[in-house]
Image (spheres, helix red, strand yellow):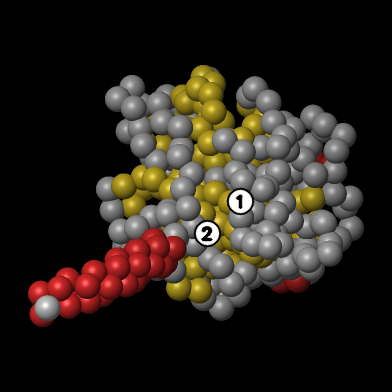
């Protein structure tokens, strides 16, 4: 009787324990979903730098109300991480209103460190010249505060004539080459670039163009080994494609798709960094329920891998994101 009682009781207890274990395992799995990396705000158009063993992530803030299907972006945000898993938010370091000549629209941007200062190249709407413009702010710290570096736009719509649209001067990315020469790339429909003077706030020569298949916007320059990589938003809805070159000025050889359309978002905007010996692909999607989408986006991070010949492997987007 005692053995039977124990077996029956044990069966009951074992069954409950199994269910409890399954529930705990499921909850643990949900807790390990690290994409998107920021869930209390909608974030987009991420850029990132590595400085003093930390990653600093800069993003636009999607602020469109749930019933508005349009971009409403009034500030940029900054986060930092020592492990790519846990992110600390810092006070808002910059807004379009910090540029007296701008009228709004905190669109895509990028920060770069050079000679001990941090330069933030941003897309805004110009207050008196029709169209989007590129401004530059400067700070002594990666978290700001930043201030307008020149009191006027660096690039305005009337400086470029390759296309008649008013939003072709957007999405700046900056690269400082091994010889110290800085380059600014940007554009929509047409990819453009120009040298920057050593002060980082003036163009040093003519505006040039890069011929890329189905270039939409969002150029990003990075280098690994002897190869330069120019990735960009491709077609619409946007995938990410890329080209490679042994020179920052080209010629560029198209290599294909790097990242597919990111869920529930017509746009994509990438940043590629190496941190503590690992490579990362930073992007946005529209995955936060229930109002996430093309105008309420969210930054995500996944690993990036290279082939032996230097080409990049297709990025696998995950819900788990970076775990360690």
Residue 18 vs residue 144: left or right?
left
- Tally the marks: 2
Determine crowd level at label 2: few under 14, some 14-19, many 20+ residues with C-alpha closer than 10 A. Answer: many
Which residue is depicted at the point 53% across and 24% down?
Answer: 256
**How far from the left and from the top, in percent, is residue 77?**
59, 68
Check disc 1 and report its element: helix, strand or loop: strand
Check disc 2 and report its element: helix, strand or loop: loop
**How far from the left and from the top, in percent, is residue 138?**
57, 65
Residue 79 vs residue 72: left or right?
left
**How far from the left and from the top, in percent, is residue 218?**
63, 42
Q: Quadrant of the N terminus?
A: bottom left
Q: Residue furthest front?
A: 1
Which residue is depicted at the point 44% across and 63% down?
Answer: 30
Towards the viewer: 234 or 11: 11
Q: Who comes first in sequence, dot 2 or dot 1?
A: 2
Determine crowd level at label 1: few under 14, some 14-19, many 20+ residues with C-alpha closer than 10 A. Answer: many
Does residue 116 show up? Answer: no
54 over 164 or under it: above or below: below
Towards the viewer: 106 or 312: 312
Q: Quadrant of the C terminus?
A: bottom left
Which residue is depicted at the point 54% across and 28% down?
Answer: 257
249 over 160 or under it: above or below: above
Residue 215 vs residue 125: left or right?
left
- Would you name the residue on which mark 1 appears? 285
Whether label 2 touches label 1, CB < 8 Å: yes
- Would you name the residue on which mark 2 appears? 36
């Amino acid at each position: 009787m005692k053995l039977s009682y124990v077996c029956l009781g044990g069966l009951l207890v074992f069954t409950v324990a199994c269910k409890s274990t399954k529930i705990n395992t499921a909850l643990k799995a949900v807790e390990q979903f690290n994409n998107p990396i920021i869930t209390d705000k909608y974030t987009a158009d991420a850029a990132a730098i590595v400085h003093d063993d930390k990653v600093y992530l800069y993003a636009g803030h999607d602020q469109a109300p749930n019933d508005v299907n349009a971009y409403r972006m009034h500030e940029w945000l900054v986060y930092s991480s020592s492990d790519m898993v846990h992110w600390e938010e810092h006070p808002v370091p910059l807004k379009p209103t910090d540029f007296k000549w701008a009228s709004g629209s905190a669109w895509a941007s990028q920060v770069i460190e050079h000679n001990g200062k941090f330069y933030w190249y941003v897309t805004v709407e110009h207050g008196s010249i029709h169209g989007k413009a590129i401004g530059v702010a400067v700070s002594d710290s990666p978290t700001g505060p930043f201030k307008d570096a020149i009191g006027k736009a660096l690039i305005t719509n009337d400086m470029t004539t390759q296309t008649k649209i008013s939003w072709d001067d957007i999405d700046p990315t900056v690269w400082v080459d091994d010889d110290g020469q800085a380059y600014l790339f940007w554009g929509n429909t047409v990819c453009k670039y120009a040298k920057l003077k050593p002060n980082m706030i003036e163009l040093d020569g003519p505006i040039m163009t890069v011929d890329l298949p189905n270039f939409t916007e969002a150029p990003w320059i990075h280098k690994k080994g002897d190869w330069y990589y120019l990735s960009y938003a491709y077609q619409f809805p946007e995938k990410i494609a890329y080209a490679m070159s042994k020179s920052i000025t080209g010629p560029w050889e198209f290599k294909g798709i790097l990242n597919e359309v990111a869920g529930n978002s017509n746009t994509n905007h990438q940043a590629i960094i190496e941190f503590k010996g690992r490579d990362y692909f930073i992007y946005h999607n529209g995955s936060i329920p229930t109002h996430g989408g093309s105008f309420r986006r969210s930054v995500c991070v996944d690993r990036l891998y290279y082939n032996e010949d230097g080409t990049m492997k297709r990025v696998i987007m995950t819900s788990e994101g970076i775990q360690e």
